[in-house]
Image (tube, helix red, strand yellow):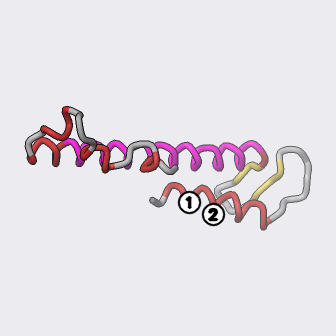
Amino acid sequence: MNTRAYIPMDFLNVPGTQLEKLPWEHEQILRRYLSMSQHICELDELYSMMVFNLENMFEKFSLQFDDRIFAKRGETVDVIQINALLCNASAQGGH
């Protein structure tokens, strides 16, 4: 999730590149574009983590609309495990 380590914003000030010759307005547009691209990458990763957590939960448990929960493999239902999976999924989806 550390996308800012891949594209440091100070690369625009590297001497000898065409980027240092950009007009100020174009540099600002490029900076905003890179910042938005980084945010989109982070959101995509958060979404993938949320889907992983939900798939993991639905693979192991059957959740009913009346708040009953059944383990699909006949194990005992561990409330802590379910709460952890739900907390992880909702934490990733809430950003």
The crowd level at tag 1 (other Cα within 10 Å; few <14, some 14-19, many 20+) is some
- Residue 40 picture location, percent across and down: 38, 44
Residue 15 lies in the magenta stretch: no
Instruction: Report the residue that reaches farthest toward the top.
Output: 18
On the picture, is 11 further left or further right than 6?
left
Residue closer to the observer: 1 or 50: 1
Q: How many marks can you see? A: 2
Magenta span: 30-59
- Above or below 62: residue 19: above
Q: Are marks 1 and 2 in contact (CB under 8 Å)?
A: yes
Task: Measure the alpha-carbon separation of dots 1 and 2.
Answer: 5 Å
Q: Identify the residue at horizontal 74%, vertical 49% (top origin).
A: 62
Which element is circle 2 on?
A: helix
Q: Mark 1 points at which residue?
A: 90
Callout 1 secondary element: helix
Q: What residue type is labelled 1?
A: Ser
- Where is 7 relative to 85, above or below? above
Looking at the image, residue 49 sits to the left or right of residue 62; the answer is: left
Q: Residue at x 56, y 59 (%)?
A: 90
Front-most of residues 52 and 27: 27
Could you tell me which residue is drawn at 57 percent across and 49 percent down? 50
Nearest to the observer: residue 63 or residue 44: 44
Residue 8 image offset from top left, x and y in percent: 37, 48
Density class for disc 2 (Cα within 10 Å; few <14, some 14-19, many ≥20) is: some
Q: Is the magenta stretch mostly helix, strand or loop?
A: helix
* 40 magenta-colored: yes
Determine whether, in the image, residue 7 is placed left or right of residue 90.
Answer: left
Which three-letter amino acid code belongs to the residue tagged 2?
Answer: Cys
Residue identified by numbered label 2: 87
Position of the C terminus, as image quadrant, is: bottom left
**Is 88 on the left-hand or right-hand side of 19?**
right
Instruction: Please state the horizontal and vertical placement of residue 41, each as a whole percent of the image.
Output: 43, 43
